[in-house]
Image: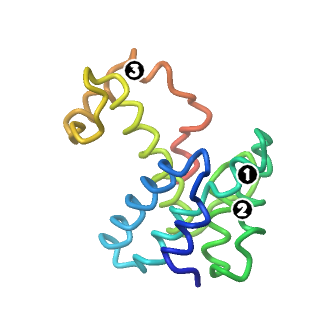
């Protein structure tokens, strides 16, 4: 299993590094709340978009390439979650880990989008109340890519 430091070195300089760090924090919190392996879940969040720059927009390969890059460095369960986190690969989520990664990825994107419309654009000012407000705001939600955020994928 990779260490967190090794994983951070792998994502250093990648276009989605900040997003991956955010997803890893959400995953670690979920793991703690669910009584799962926090270190493992944090690594999955940290590395789930490792291949984003390599696939160059071919999202049917996104997650599949990352899993190949990480083979032997993460458990098969972790690699499967990375393969399954984007529905465009055709890999179906099965485990709690798979579904948690999909949800964490979406939550991270939603939080950043909510912060982007705040006057000072600071994530630190986002509260649960702010997120609930934005979730109910039809003009805010209208801009979302609904095919990416289909909740039926994780239910």
* Label 2 sits on residue: 66
Label 2: how many Cα within 10 Å (few below 14, some 14–19, many 20+): many
Circle 1 SS class: loop
Choose mark 3 or mark 1, whichever is in front: 1
Viewer-closest of 138 and 70: 70
Q: Name the spot of residue 141 as percent of width and height, x first.
A: 43, 24
Please report the residue visible at 49 percent of the width from the left and 74 percent of the height from the top: 5
- Which picture quadrant has residue 71? bottom right
Evaluate if marks 2 and 1 touch, with contact meaning CB atoms under 8 Å apart: yes
> Where is 142 relative to 5, above or below?
above
Label 1: how many Cα within 10 Å (few below 14, some 14–19, many 20+): many
Please report the residue visible at 38 percent of the width from the left and 71 percent of the height from the top: 31
> Where is 20 relative to 69, above or below?
above
Separation (CA) of disc 2 from disc 3: 32 Å
Looking at the rendered structure, which numbered label has been put on residue 140?
A: 3
Label 3: how many Cα within 10 Å (few below 14, some 14–19, many 20+): some
* Label 1 sits on residue: 62
Q: Name the spot of residue 86 as percent of width and height, x first.
A: 65, 50
Evaluate if marks 3 and 1 touch, with contact meaning CB atoms under 8 Å apart: no
- Which picture quadrant has residue 146? top right
Circle 3 SS class: helix
Viewer-closest of 63 and 7: 7
């Amino acid at each position: 299993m990779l260490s967190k430091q090794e994983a951070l070195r792998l994502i250093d300089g990648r276009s989605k590094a900040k997003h991956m760090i955010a997803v890893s924090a959400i995953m670690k919190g979920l793991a703690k709340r669910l009584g799962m392996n926090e270190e493992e879940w944090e690594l999955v969040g940290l590395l789930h978009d490792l291949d984003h720059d390599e696939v160059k927009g071919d999202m049917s390969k996104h997650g599949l390439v990352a899993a190949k890059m990480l083979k032997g460095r993460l458990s098969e369960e972790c690699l499967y979650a990375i393969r399954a986190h984007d529905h465009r690969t055709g890999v179906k989520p099965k485990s709690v880990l798979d579904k948690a990664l999909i949800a964490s990825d979406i939550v991270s994107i939603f939080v950043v989008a909510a912060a982007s419309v705040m006057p000072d654009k600071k994530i630190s000012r986002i509260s649960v109340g702010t997120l609930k407000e934005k979730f109910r705001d039809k003009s805010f939600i209208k801009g979302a890519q609904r095919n990416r955020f289909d909740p039926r994928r994780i239910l």
